[in-house]
Amino acid sequence: MLTRVRNLYPPTRVLARRLPELHGNVFHALNTLLPADLARSDTLVSRVAGSPDLYLQVMERHNYTSFIRLTYVMGSERQHNPNAHIRIYHDARMAEATAFSPGQGIHRLAGPELPVHGLVTRAWRLNRALLKWLDYLLAEGHGPDTMQAIDDAPEYLRYDFGMEDQPAG
């Protein structure tokens, strides 16, 4: 008897071809969530009844790219969960998750010792998770109308976002 085994995961080549489309979908969801005047403030908070506060920090700004951190800050321990680091390519109208956990920021993920399959699969999973979370945030009511600038970030937020060396006001 011959048994046929079906691969449940698409081959790396298929994921690699579909990754730019996924990055475009993430960019579109971010544009729906974020206010148009994002350039006016580096730290924003969105408060929606029944949902934890959603914080956004612009970590880097360049002519064609931005790097942001989007996270819930929950509980008295001020845990960041999830904690998404997102690179936005404004000119290409694409965005990608570079990390989706508290301990990560930008890590070196490419090199001769890392197989391409692992890099593509990791990028696919991170960006699918980010897209699902962005869709959830939009369904919860977060959006450009709920995002408010924080001119003087609270001390815990300044520390959590690595802004502790900046003056308080």
Image (cartoon, grey):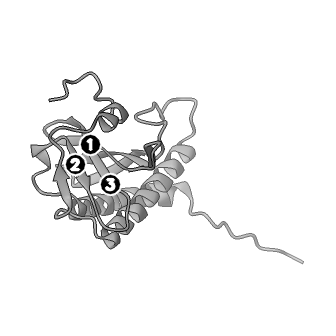
Badge 3 local density, few (<14 within 10 Å), some, or many (20+)? many
Q: Quadrant of residue 152?
A: top left
Up-down relation of residue 3 to residue 121 (above or below) = below
Residue at far top of view: 165
Real-space Cα separation, disc 3 to disc 1, in angstroms:
10 Å
Name the one closer to the observer, 12 or 161. Answer: 161
Can residue 35 be seen by looking at this rendering? yes
The reply to whether callout 2 and callout 3 are in contact (CB within 8 Å) is no
Pointer 1 residue? 57
Real-space Cα separation, disc 2 to disc 1, in angstroms:
6 Å
Q: Quadrant of the N terminus?
A: bottom right
Pointer 2 residue? 44
Task: Give x and y (percent) for residue 70.
Answer: 33, 49
Up-down relation of residue 4 to residue 165 (above or below) = below
In the drawing, what numbered circle is on residue 131?
none
Q: Secondary structure at mark 2?
A: strand
Residue name at image x 41 percent, y 35 percent: 105
Task: Give x and y (percent) for residue 29.
Answer: 28, 63
The reply to whether callout 2 and callout 1 are in contact (CB within 8 Å) is yes
Residue name at image x 56 percent, y 63 percent: 10
Q: Secondary structure at mark 3?
A: strand
Query: Residue 163 vs residue 131: left or right?
Result: left
Residue name at image x 34 percent, y 70 percent: 140
Residue at far front of view: 76
Real-space Cα separation, disc 2 to disc 3, in angstroms:
8 Å
Amino acid identity at mark 2: Leu
Pointer 3 residue? 54
Query: Residue 97 vs residue 138: left or right?
Result: right
Badge 1 local density, few (<14 within 10 Å), some, or many (20+)? many
Task: Give x and y (percent) for residue 18.
Answer: 41, 61
